Image: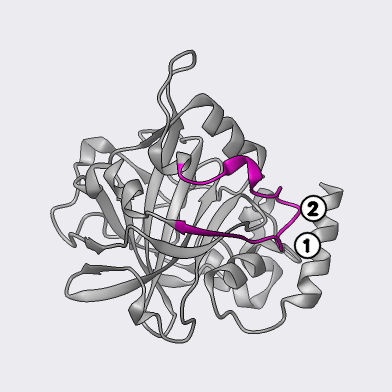
Amino acid sequence: MSAFILAATLLSAVMACPQHDLSQSLMKRAEGSDWTYDAAYNWGMINENYTTCQTGAQQSPIHLETATGFSKTHVPTFNYSTATPGSLYNWGYGAAFSLTANTTNLSGNPSMTFDNETVYLKGWHIHAPADHTIDSTRPKAELHFVHATASGKERAVVALMIDPVPYGTTGNSTFFNSFPLASIPPFSDQTTRIPLTMNLNQALTEIDNAKTFWTYEGSLTSPPCTEGLRWFVGGKKMTVGTEQMQELLAISTYSAREEQKLWGHNINK
């Protein structure tokens, strides 16, 4: 933990510039200079810029139930590429991928459309354990595909739950086989970048292209807890092999916010 705090302190000195891309945004969230995940209950009290964490009516994550059914509205359509260039890195809490693209106009990025609105992919990152709970169970990890407006304002997140196959059985994820998990640096190293071209469609394929999903109005899951995001949570989990799960966890540190009380989230509405 002391090594992580030292790394976070150093990052706070060098990351003072505005957030232009996903890697910078995540690293600023991960630097933890005045907040930590294990004290999430207090975020709204430690910094006036984090007041929404305490007072917001649409805070994320939340608990979801299969008994409530899946959404029939806000249905997303994806326009992802099978060859998206970018770089792998550790965002301070686990594996992440940031696109190599114009950071001031994202309209050339892979995209998703819902409700006649098109948003553009900035990248993905992993939380371990999962942010959301499903049927009173918290999966071992959660993959977030972060989307923004063309100008870069975060607008929507596609969340995929991740759990391993039953212990003692086999069955790897093709998506996680497509890049070198073991070579991603530990959470204490947020500067190393590994250039990579990814088939992002593969992740969607492994959850049946999100044919079943929950959706709700939510927020960022860490300070400043900004609201105004549309969340899509896949109804089908991604399944990874035991070794893949172990490799993901080995480069991760705790990054799950406690699920928030339901209020103005309008689940599936």
Query: Up-down: is 241 above or below 213?
Result: above
User: Quadrant where the C terminus lies?
Assistant: bottom left
Residue wearing tag 1:
8
Residue wearing tag 2:
4
The reply to whether dot 2 and dot 1 touch (C-beta < 8 Å) is yes
Kindly give the residue lying farthest to the top in the view shown: 168
Query: Which region shows up in magenta?
Result: 178-197
Crowding near the residue tagged with mark 2, few <14, some 14–19, many ≥20 C-alpha atoms within 10 Å: some
User: Looking at this view, is 54 or 122 the one in front?
Assistant: 122
Question: Looking at numbered disc 2 in the image, what kind of residue is underneath it?
Answer: Phe
Horizontal side of 214 relative to 27 (left or right) equals: left
| Residue 188 on the magenta segment | yes
Please indicate, yes or no, whether residue 238 appears anywhere in the rendered image: yes
**Local secondary structure at mark 2:** helix
Query: Up-down: is 74 above or below 224?
Result: above
As drawn, the label of residue 187 is none
User: Percent position (x, y) of residue 29?
Assistant: 63, 65
User: Percent position (x, y) of residue 176?
Assistant: 46, 41
